Structures are given as structure tokens and as C-alpha cells.
Amino acid sequence: MAKPEATAKLRHRRILLKLSGEALGGDKGYGIDLRVIQQIADDVAKAASMGAEICLVVGGGNIYRGLNAAEGGIDRARGDYMGMLATVMNALALQTAIERAGKKVRVMSAIPMPTVCESYIRDKALDHLAKGRVVIFAGGTGNPFFTTDTAAALRAAEMGCEALLKATQVDGVYSADPETTPNAHRYDRLTYGDVLKQDLRIMDGAAIALARDNGIPIIVFSIKSQDGLTAVLQGKGSSTTIESGKAA
Ligand code: UDP
């Protein structure tokens, strides 16, 4: 278990980190790039050593997306199940990398596959966290027509997380695409309402609404920067926080 003095330095103790599948694909954006995964895993392990209790939800877009399947003639629900299976592959890759970084990890799938990993049981997941294990939630919500963003908000609420950290390719939410608009500015703070009304597409609407209804702030930060997670947890680096109240 973490030492209290290490814990005291963190802005949030129990967090849920949402990684998109693309983040595991590195520059290619598809497949699994072990070098990229190890960098993320090292950061996760470092945050865990500082006393953070870490839940992870990983997407599957680097391998498969239900919507694309629908275009190819596979019906949407079946394609979504294929997408959910892709998240399990990513979860196992992440598990390996985080274990290599020296932390104990449990993968829990919303779709039972007992020879591969544990099935999701809330009480068991809470127990893992209390024992200092990193928990990776795989298989999304277990239901088609949802996304892993919604799974992230759902698990964050179930686990009593103090924040949902959404890792992206840029260090927050911008007024325009910073790649193409040089004078785009990064917001320090936004409200859930701003994100929904302006359709800012940081996460899908269901995920934002679930976070809002459960009072869970969403912190958008860059996964590309070295030690980005630990920096955010210590209140350093740049990010955008989405929460209730007045936007800055
Ligand atoms: N998916 C689903 N239900 C869920 C979560 C995911 O059906 O609760 C499917 C859906 O087809 C989705 C795919 O899994 O396209 C991969 O998840 P997502 O697109 O959220 O991954 P990311 O964009 O984060 O890589």
C-alpha cells in the first residue's frame, strides 16, 4: 500500500484513466506498438507508486470498430461485439507492460471469458483497488451501441473515482484544431454544459452526462508527453478540466 506522505502530493487519489485504442497504436494509429504501450505503462506504474489507485479503460479503435464493420456489411451489434473483443486484446497488452513496470494488475472483462481474465464484479474490483492493484476494465460496457468512453464514465462512477482522465494526442481542449489553427487556444476549464452544447466531441455525450450526473471531473491531457499522467496528478503540466460551475 502507498505511504500517506506520497498520497498527499496527489490531486486525486483514485482515478480512472481512459486510453483510446489509437493511443496504443503509436504514430500508425492501428495495431499495438509495444514501445508506446511501455511508455504509458511506466507512467501508470509511477503514479501507482505515488499512491494513486488506478483504474484503466482501454478502447479498441486500433483494432476494430463496430461502425466500420457496419459499413462492410456486418450488422452493427455484431461488429460492436467484435470491437469489445478488441479491447480485451489491448487490455492484455497493457497488463503485460504495467507488470513489466513492476505493478500488480488485474484485467476484468464485462464479457465473461474466464480462461482469459476475470469477469467484472464490482466488489471484486473494489477489493483489487484497495489492495493496491491496477485494474484494467476490458470489454467496454459489455453492450453494443455503446463506446468505451461511456464504459469509462460508468466504471469511474462505480469505483468512486475522484476524476476521469481522458488521454488524447493533445494537451487539452482547444478552441479549434491546434494542428491547423495556430492561434487556437487551450481552455483551462470548461463545464459539462459547454462540452455538450458546443458538441466539442471530447467524449461521447452519454459519457459526459454520466460524469456530470455523478460529479466526476474529466481531465483531458496529452498521452504523448513523457510522464503526462503523473504530471497531471501532481497539478503540473497543461490540461483542460471539465466540471460543473462557471467556466474560466
Ligand atoms: N464497443 C461497444 N460497447 C461498449 C464499448 C465498445 O460496442 O460498451 C465497441 C464499439 O464497436 C466500438 C469498439 O468497441 O467501436 C471500440 O471501442 P471505442 O470505439 O470506444 O474505442 P476507442 O475509440 O476508444 O479506441
Image: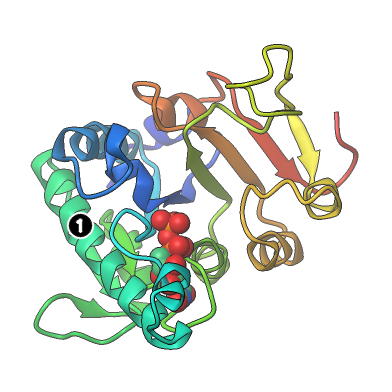
- The residue nearer to you, when weighing 200 against 118, is 200
Q: Which quadrant does the C terminus fall into?
A: top right
The reply, left or right, for residue 35 in relation to residue 47 is: left
**Left or right of 8 on screen, residue 118:** left
Residue at the extreme top: 183
The residue that disc 1 covers is 105
Q: Residue at x 69, y 19 (%)?
A: 181
171 or 123: nearer the eye? 171
**180 over 58 or under it: above or below:** above
Q: Find the residue positioned furthest to the front.
A: 72
What amino acid does circle 1 point to?
Answer: Val
Vertical placement of 183 versus 192: above or below?
Answer: above
Q: Residue placed at 48% from the left, 50% from the top?
A: 15
Q: How many marks?
A: 1
Give the x, y percent position of residue 197: 86, 53
Determine whether the residue tagged by mark 1 lies in a helix, strand or loop. Answer: strand
Please state the quadrant of the image where ligand 1 appears.
bottom left
